[in-house]
Image (cartoon, rainbow, N blue to C red):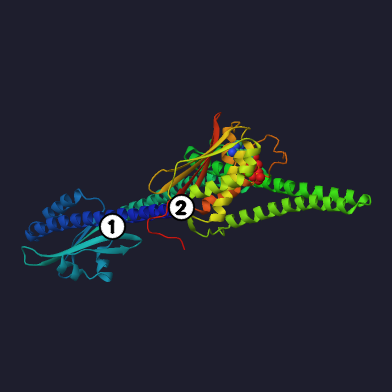
Amino acid sequence: MPVIACLLACTLLYVLSYFIERSFEKYVIAQNVTELNSVIDSLERELSYYDPEAERNDLIQNILLILASHYQLFVNITDENKNILYKTRGPNLLQVRKNIDVENIIETHGSAIWNYDQHSYRIAASSVTAADQKEYTIIVAVSRDLQLEFTERLHNGLLILITISCVLVLLGTLLTIYLTQEPINRLIKKIGSVNSKSLNNRIQPSSLPAKYASLVDAFNDMISRMETLFQRQHNFTADLAHEMRTPITNLTTQTQIALNNARTADEYKEILYSNLEEFERLTQIITDMLFLAQADNKQLVPQLVEVDLSNMFAMMFDYYEYLSEEKDIRLKLQGTCPSIQGDKLMIGRAVGNLLSNAIRYTPDNQTITVTLSQVSNKLVKVVIANPGKKIEARHLPLLFDRFYRPDESRQRNGEGAGIGLAIVKSIVEAHHGRITVESDNESTRFIMTFPIPPKGKKSA
Ligand SMILES: Nc1ncnc2c1ncn2[C@@H]1O[C@H](COP(=O)(O)OP(=O)(O)OP(=O)(O)O)[C@@H](O)[C@H]1O
Ligand SMILES: [Mg+2]
């Protein structure tokens, strides 16, 4: 784009110079023609009164007076027999007839260019009848040498001026392009040098012009998000390996011990039962990972039926009664809400995970409260609140990540893998709902919202 603008500017300058030269030439021609005509007019007047018998000297005198104020102007006056009546020093104007049709100039009152002896002239001519009834031909020539020299100098001057201007415009354009492109090139280089190992590097906004600050900020933000994702991915892989290694180590150790000595059938049976538990734990991890992979690939398609959440929680309370009674924990359900469209098995799994977490993290002899409500004609809300230790705010958004557990060392204490909430989130989102968590000194609250199906829409 700047190159096109530069080319246009140069072309414009050349066109401008062409018109300046043409206008000057026209002006000069007009000047010459006016001068020639005025001299011819004066000479015609003198000749028309001319009496060759009495006034020859007077005539010469008057012609000299007429020509006095004209520089480089030449005259030739001849009678019908080509006898010279008057002629100035200088070019032999009788030669004009060799190249130029003088009669035509006389007829048309025109002028013509006459090049003679390496000089150039503009000539005009006229025919006049004197007092003695003789016909005289006047040829007047004005030198164009000075004008041609000046025109040539003007042409060369303009050419040099315009060429310098064009070079300057071109250099200016190239400099502008360079100054605009250079920071972009630096940015491209820096972006190009980013790889998975240098994700903690940021581009300093001060290293680029201020106009690129928002671009740099956006890029740095993107890198921050990528760094977080990479870190999470890294943790996920490490945690998955760790989770699978524990049961496999247990299996290996138990099998080695069993093989070391001869055992009774009951002892072997006990070892096999213990191994079965580890196999089940492995199976559970793999099943959960497959479930989450399906959710990631949007392959989790709920089989929608009408789900009454009050019934669902009542049923789940029965299921977890044994677990809660062990810790003297009461399960309380309050409020109501309209039914939602959902996959009963999936919703049951999500509710089960949330309740088992609540029971696991609630101190003994406390109450877990589930509150159902309708927040608008489009949304129902489910809040599962349990007392217990406050979860620090920085952990809250990460609780739904796979294998994320808030304990600093991220060590397992054998209680759970840390996949439960990731599964709950996938299920809620597959139902077009949302899940968030809040925690303070009073309680930890998991809040789910689900859309209410439009009236009249029945499940398949
Ligand atoms: N109701 C709750 N009260 C307090 N902390 C909770 C609660 N629910 C979850 N958490 C915290 O969130 C972490 C992640 O929960 P999540 O259900 O994903 O994993 P988990 O219960 O540790 O293991 P898993 O569910 O795979 O058996 C838990 O380790 C716990 O620290
Ligand atoms: Mg859990």
| Residue 70 in picture, x, y percent from top left | 21, 50
Question: Residue at position x 43%, y 53% from top?
Answer: 1
Query: Gap in Å between the C-alphas at discs 1 and 2?
Result: 117 Å
Give the left or right position of residue 260, taking residue 76 as reference.
right
Secondary structure category for the residue under label 2? strand
Disc 1 vs disc 2: which is toward the camera? 2
Q: Is 152 placed left or right of 260 in the picture?
A: left
Quarter assignment of residue 63: bottom left
Residue 2 visible somewhere in the drawing: yes
In the image, farthest residue toward the top? 441
Say what amino acid the circle numbered 1 marks. Gly
- In percent of width and height, residue 52 lies at 9, 61
Q: Which mark is residue 203?
A: none
Q: How would you rate the neighbour count of disc 2 (Cα within 10 Å): few for under 14, some for 14-19, many for 20 or more?
A: many
Camera sees residue 226: no
Look at the numbered disc 1 and give the secondary structure of its residue: loop
Is the residue marked by circle 1 packed among few (<14), some (14-19), or many (20+) residues within 10 Å? Answer: few
The reply to whether the residue tagged 1 has its Cβ within 8 angstroms of ligand 1 is no
Please name whichever residue, 297 or 440, is drawn nearer the observer in this view of the structure: 440
**Relative vertical location of residue 437 with respect to residue 129 in this rendering, above or below:** above
Taking depth in this image into account, of 189 and 390 the one nearest to the observer is 390
Quarter assignment of residue 121: bottom left
291 relative position to 277: left or right: left
The residue identified by callout 2 is 340
Find ligand 1 in the image and state its quadrant.
Answer: top right
Residue 97 horizontal/vertical position (percent): 24, 69
Residue at (60, 49) in percent of width and height: 423
Q: Position of residue 212 (x, y in %)?
A: 49, 41
The amino acid on which the numbered mark 2 sits, given as a three-letter code, is Ile
Give the residue at x 40% y 52%.
5
Provide the residue designation for mark 1: 90
